[in-house]
Amino acid sequence: MIADRNADRAYIEAHQIEKLSALLSEVCRTNPFYRQKLQGLAATSLLSNLPFTLKKELIDDQAAHPPFGSNLTYPVERYSRFCQTSATTGKPMRWLDTPESWNWMLGQWERVFDEAGVTAADRIFFAFSFGPFLGFWTAFDAAARMGCLCIPGGGMRSSARLATMIDSASTVLCCTPTYAIRLAEAAAEENIDLPACHIRKIVVAGEPGGSIPATRSLIEKLWNGATVIDHHGMSEVGPVSFGCPARHDVLHIIESAYIPEVLDSLTDAAVPAGGTGELVLTSLGRAGSPLIRYRTGDIVQRAAAEPCACGSYEMALEGGILGRTDDMVFVRGVNVYPRAVEEIMRSFDQVAEFRVEIDRSHALTELRIQVELEPGTADAANVGHHIEVALKDSLALRIPISIVPAGTLPRFEMKARRWVRL
C-alpha cells in the first residue's frame, strides 16, 4: 500500500512497475492460464506490450477446466476463500483466493473506509444476504480488522434490519444504493422511526447510484442527511475505488493495488485526461488468481485535473462508473445508458420505483418505462407526462411512461434489475 495518500505520479508509477514485475515473474512460472497467454513476454515491464484479458476467456477457461479454471498460480490446497460473480451479464465465474490475496483485498477496503471517515469507534451494519459475492465478505472482514463493531444483516427482513440498526446504535450502513432506498420505504410501511437511527454514513456499492447526484440526494434525504459514499469493485478483480472525500461525484482508483488504463473501446488507444473510455485493470497483489489488463466493460471519464481537490494523484473518475459496454441500448439513433435514465427518474420525488422494458420485437428497438409512484401522489397522469418530457429533453427520445399500482414492481436487496429485455 502507498502510505502517503499525496504520493505523486512518479512515486505511484515506480511502485506499480515494481509490483507488476514481481507479479509477472510469479504467475509466468506456475499459472497455466497466464503462462500460455504471456509466453515470451514475462520479462517486459511495459504494460502496453501485454495482451488484454477478456471475460469470455475466463468463462471459457472455467468451462474447459472445471470447476475453477486454470487461472490459479498455486495448488488448490493453498486457497481458503471462494466467491462467485453476480452474473448480471452472463454465466457466473468462480474465484478462489489465498490468505495472502484475501488480506491484500482487505487493505483496499480499509482504504475505502478510511477515506470515508469511518473509524474503529463506528458500528457498521451490513445489510447484505452474505451469499458468494466477494464485496460483502471483504468489507466485513476489513471493518473487523479495523476494530469496528460489525453487525451482519444476513437472513433478515428489512424491518428486522432496521430494528437491529436502531437497537445497536449503528452509525454506518453498507448496502446497495437501491436497498438504501428500499430500507427507507420499509421504515415508512412498518411505522419504524427512521430518525431514531444513528446512521451518519452510508457506504454504497454494487451499482452506480452513489455517484448519480439525484440518487445520492434522495438517499441522503431519506436518511436524515447521512452522507452517501460511493465505491466500486468486482469479484474477479477486488475492491477497486474509493469515494473522493472532497468531491462526491468522483471515484479514485486505488493505484497502490491496481494499474488502471482508460482506453477507446474501438481503437484500444489510451484516452487522454478528460476523455471517456473503457476501464482496463491490472491487479497487482492478487497473485493467486491474478488479472492482467482486464477489460472490465465499465465506461468511465478520466478527470482532467491532477492532483484532485482532495490532494490525491490517483486516477480520478468523473461521475464514477458511467455505464457498461454491455448495458448500452441503441434506440432510434441514440445511445442510452441506464445511469442517464436513473438520474432523470430519481429527480422526481413522486417516483417510488421504476422498470425499463426493452422491446426488440420490431425493426427498431423501443423503450418503455413502468413507474410506481409514492402513496398519495396526486394527479398521477400529470406526473407521468412530466417524466416523459424530462426524458425527451435529456435523451432526445420519446419514451412512453405507464403508471402502475403501488406494490407492482419488484424491490431489490442486491443489484437492481430494472432493465428487462422482452
Image (cartoon, rainbow, N blue to C red):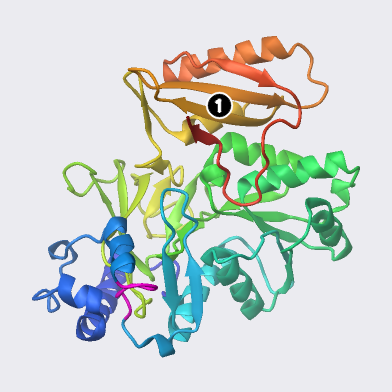
- Name the residue at 84% across, 63% down: 169
398 over 69 or under it: above or below: above
Label 1: element kind:
helix
Image location of residue 24, percent across then percent down:
22, 78
Examine the image and state in which quarter residue 55 appears.
bottom left
Tell me the residue that label 1 is attached to.
344
**Going by the image, does 121 lie left or right of 258?**
right
Query: Which of 269/92 is in front?
Result: 92
**Going by the image, does 99 lie left or right of 333?**
right
Image location of residue 31, percent across then percent down:
26, 80
Query: Which of 18/130 is in front?
Result: 130
**Going by the image, does 271 lie left or right of 391?**
left
Callout 1 environment at 10 Å: few (<14), some (14 to 19), or many (20+)? Answer: some
User: From this viewpoint, is residue 122 visible?
Assistant: no
The amino acid pointed to by label 1 is Ile
- Name the residue at 18% across, 48% down: 268
Q: Which residues are magenta?
A: 65-72
